[in-house]
Image: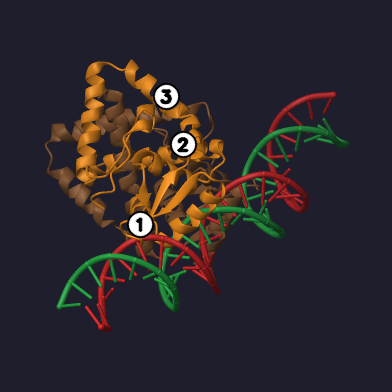
Chain colours: A orange, B brown, C red, D green
Amino acid sequence: MENSQKALVLLRKIIRSADVQNKEISRRTGLTLSQFLLMQTLREEGQMTTGELAKSLALTQATVTSILDRLEKKALIARERGEVDKRKVWISLTDAGLELMKGAPTTQQEVFVRDFEDMQPWEQSMMVAGLERAVYLLNAEHLDASPVLDIGQLDRPPRTDAGK
Amino acid sequence: MENSQKALVLLRKIIRSADVQNKEISRRTGLTLSQFLLMQTLREEGQMTTGELAKSLALTQATVTSILDRLEKKALIARERGEVDKRKVWISLTDAGLELMKGAPTTQQEVFVRDFEDMQPWEQSMMVAGLERAVYLLNAEHLDASPVLDIGQLDRPPRTDAGK
DNA sequence: TCAAAAAGTTTGATATTCGAACTATTTATA
DNA sequence: TATAAATAGTTCGAATATCAAACTTTTTGA
């Protein structure tokens, strides 16, 4: 098999594996997968508008609105009409929402990290280098992604709305 | 940043990028995302049972049945009752289904392949090796959850219907 | 000033998704 | 060997997801 085909198959395996993980975690939190991914995005990015959420999740605004409706009913997110630009609606996690996401046990990732740290340094570097190269080819460097496991992310300074 | 955190960030970038791509592609084929992913799995794995599909996609059998219903109505997949084990139902792509998937040569993937082939052989090998290692780690953690047909097992032998 | 653009919601339609109950078949065991 | 348990798949009902199109409100640009 071509090397490029091998790489594509491996990438798809990574993606599928992540999908499985996300589904498991979302079930553990009592959320649907879409709700969980939306909450995860919010946790990473802080306050966002409906439109930004839609773009980040590759969904339409209408879809995001309907997911937000349900999360709001559960008091996991809050809507706030923009003050500068009154068309915008700023979404943020409530305390309950933050708590739920903090409690989302990323056991899977913990296992990944433990196994990773068992590898030889040269192996670690090789893997990171390989992944970096793949991300570059996928043109995905610009995508905003944080390591979900990193609890420190939770108290990232709130995004400044200024430039919006 | 820790190497392991770097790796997690890179993996998440790959996953988001793929999600966006998949949504684009599925729209182009006139399929929903779920239908597309199911067809993609079939194309990669060949003939599969409903249950194997469900496990591979991290869905319940009931869900897969309903997606299959719609794909069958469009004549993109075919069901065939197992001969050896009559409880099983073997799913395969029809010619039309194959054609549709062949015709979905994701532009993104073409770009990926072209760029990949521009790389030095040693770089190609490094990337494949890195990805392989990542897939291995991701698999290892999943093994305890579902011992049977694990997602993306590395060197799964080509499917033989005999023993089924 | 006012038409177009932008942000978000609503509506209506189809699809996804699950758990639970069901049928048919196979396997295990007493 | 009889039969209880397990396995494979479907059906059903209910909650969600998802989109396109139409709509409201607000901002921008000419």
Q: In which quarter of the image is the N terminus of chain A?
A: top left
Which badge, 2 or 1, comes first in the chain's sequence? 1
Q: Are marks 3 and 1 in contact (CB under 8 Å)?
A: no
Q: How crowded is mark 3: few (under 14 residues within 10 Å), some or many (20 or more)?
A: few
The circle on residue A98 is 2
Q: Where is residue D26 in the image (x, y as percent from the top left)?
A: 34, 66
The circle on residue A51 is 1
- Please report the residue visible at 24 percent of the width from the left and 40 percent of the height from the top: A135
| Residue A59: quadrant of the picture | bottom left
Apparent side of residue A26 relative to residue B102 in the rendered image (left or right): right
- Please report the residue visible at 22 percent of the width from the left and 32 percent of the height from the top: A130
Q: Mark 2 lies on which chain?
A: A
Q: Are marks 3 and 1 on the same chain?
A: yes
Q: Mark 1 lies on which chain?
A: A
Residue type pointed to by label 2: Leu
Residue type pointed to by label 1: Gly
Residue A64 shows up from this direction:
yes
Q: How crowded is mark 1: few (under 14 residues within 10 Å), some or many (20 or more)?
A: some
